[in-house]
Amino acid sequence: VQLQASGGGLVQPGGSLNLSCVASGFRFSGTKMYWLRQAPSKDLEWVSSISTLGTIADYVESVKGRFTISRDNAKNTVYLQMNGLKSEDTAVYYCGRDKYGNGRGQGTLVTVSS
């Protein structure tokens, strides 16, 4: 199983980023997918999840209305569009197959700073 997140970077408050995570080694189209994040000195936090067909999405309260999760089963890829970024969104972002981040792959660093 491999999960490779990308798309992070340095962005000013109010800016946007679109994260991608390419998956391999398991049946992606039959797997609910998750985005998680870990801010400096904090525990891993579930951010969002999306159903197998992409029809049901859930978000942690702090990102509702700003983040949008989506997936492309033909490309084995899950996305996280992040708008209206805040300093408190600064974290390493991971995709995973459960909300606890078990087996999560390499993350991508998002830094929100002016």
Image (cartoon, grey):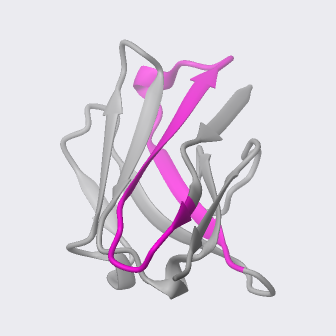
Classify 106 as above or below 98.
Answer: above
Classify 61 as above or below 67.
Answer: below
In the picture, measured across the screen, residue 68 lies left or right of residue 38, that is left
Residue at 30% over, 65% down = 83
In the picture, measured across the screen, residue 58 lies left or right of residue 77, that is left
Q: What stretch is highlighted in magenta?
A: 10-39
Comparing 52 with 68, the one in front is: 68
Magenta stretch holds residue 106 = no
Residue at 73% over, 27% down = 2
Residue at 34% over, 69% down = 59
Displayed quadrant of residue 41 = bottom right
Q: Position of residue 51 (x, y in %)?
A: 32, 43
Classify 34 as above or below 74.
Answer: below
Comparing 43 with 13, the one in front is: 13
- The quadrant of the picture occupied by the N terminus is top right
Q: Tell which residue pokes out farthest to the front in this image.
A: 114
Displayed quadrant of residue 79 = top left
Comparing 105 with 53, the one in front is: 105
Q: Where is residue 53 in the image (x, y as percent from the top left)?
A: 26, 31
Magenta stretch holds residue 18 = yes
Q: Where is residue 77 in the image (x, y as percent from the top left)?
A: 46, 28
Q: Position of residue 96 (x, y in %)?
A: 61, 47
Residue at 56% over, 27% down = 22
